Image (cartoon, rainbow, N blue to C red):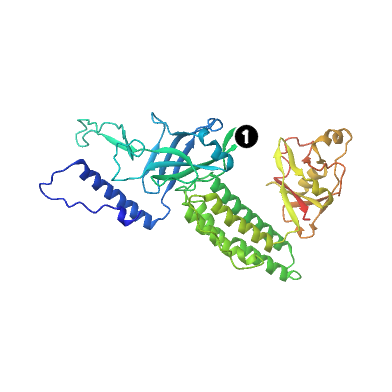
Amino acid sequence: MRADDIPLAIQWHDGMLLSPQHFQEADRRSERLLAYHLGQAAPYHHGIATLKLAEGTLGSGLLRVQQVEAIMPDGTLVHHAGGKHDLSVDLRPQAALVRDAPATVFLAVPRAQAAVSASAADLARHRSAEGAAVVDEHTGEDPLEIPRIAPSVRLLVAAEPPPRLVCLPIARVRLEGEAFVATDYIPPTLGVAPGSPLDEMCQRLAGRLREKAMRLAEKANFLSRTTDRELIGEIRRQIQCLVAALPPFEAVLYSERPHPFSLFVTLTGLVGQISSLARTPVPPLLPRYRHDDLRATFENARDHIFRMVDEGIIESFTAYPFDLKEGKYNVLFQREFRTRAVVIAVRAPRGVREDQLLNWMNGALIGAPGRLRTMQESRILGAGRKRVERHGDLVATPGTLLFELEEQSVYLDPGEPLTLCNTADPTGQSGPSEAVLYVKSG
């Protein structure tokens, strides 16, 4: 919104002959003044507040919006919640466009153009709308039907939005075979809702940094303050790089629907702080914030963080957590694991002593799912295991037990799950609260 888009104030005077255009112009000026001020104070004050797409229709080529609440780039408020006005677009005529590359679906409203007749259906900015009768708020009587208008909103598929329309991207679609599917595109939003893809991405990032910092802290606590003084100092420096900018990021992330730009600014603080870990401690120059492509914007910064952490904190083991299902702990035993050192770490649940967890592990079956029955019938526990306090830089922290697995065990099938279970505890209630497979890095 520019200043020359705002109509000059009407010079009202006594005896003026009024017409609808006078009130329309006054209304237009007030709306654009507000949009102008908001645009200066908050440049990214547009996006989706609520969006719900119909399920089961996209594959056949029909994208239908069941509910949407959004602010368009020009400040127009759009609200659609079903009713007699259908908001959908047929993707089949655009099959050639979508087959070559993903195409964007836009929410669109015609631009306000004084020179265009409002009767032109394709460019009419508003449509007539029904509203409830309004009563006199003082008496509660005399209900009056007031004519109303609503934005003439529509959907369109295009590589670039046409200039005659104000457009807001809401989805990207592609063609897989003969079916239309939505990509993982994240449209511009007014707030990052809990559980949204962007929220989950940021939570995983924060969780990974906290987990790595906790592992380093536990490792430092296990070391000797006399003989390992230099190593402890280096570990504390690494922890400081990981977590110094984490509280501001988490404070914004866990607030109620933070604006994505505010969240991105705190994310860049993480980039700057963690850059001290990288081979080149100068923070990377990030691409500019793109409100219309939030996934690409955030993933770029996130990937820089992961790269710098991997460069600065070299761990000789890679962690693969087990999943607990029906009393069995499972993790994929990849083919390349067979020739590497493998360690299982188990954490004791609250209220369970280490010796109890040790007994559980000593009686547990370890092997591929297809070999469990044979192991039970033969009274064999499967892959051999040996408890250790330390394996290289992998240290058993308080409450955690480490077990080396025998190399190239015949009970472990590459490419198949590795299962950990105890037949005396079929539900896994007495088992570890957490189990992790550590594999020596290649």
Tell me where residue 45 appears, x and y as whole percent. Answer: 41, 51
Nearest the viewer among 156 and 134 is 156
Along the horizontal axis of the image, is 212 left or right of 437? left
Query: Which class describes the residues within 10 Å of circle 1: few (<14), some (14-19), or many (20+)?
Result: few
Is residue 223 depicted above or below 367 in this figure? below
Give the amino acid type for the residue marked by disc 1 in the picture.
Gly
Along the horizontal axis of the image, is 48 left or right of 115? right
Is residue 297 depicted above or below 237 in this figure? above
Along the horizontal axis of the image, is 150 left or right of 181? left
Residue 417: which quarter of the image?
top right
Which residue is located at x 70 percent, y 40 percent?
Answer: 324
Tell me where residue 386 appears, x and y as whole percent. Answer: 84, 50
Q: Is residue 347 visible?
A: no
Farthest right residue in view: 378
Q: Is residue 70 visible?
A: yes
Farthest left residue in view: 15
Along the horizontal axis of the image, is 274 left or right of 187? right
* Numbered circles on residues, count: 1
Tell me where residue 106 appears, x and y as whole percent. Answer: 46, 42
Nearest the viewer among 130 and 411 is 130
Nearest the viewer among 106 and 400 is 106
Secondary element type, mark 1: loop
Identify the image quadrant of the C terminus: bottom right
Look at mark 1 in the image and give the residue it sits on. 177
Tell me where residue 259 appears, x and y as whole percent. Answer: 46, 52
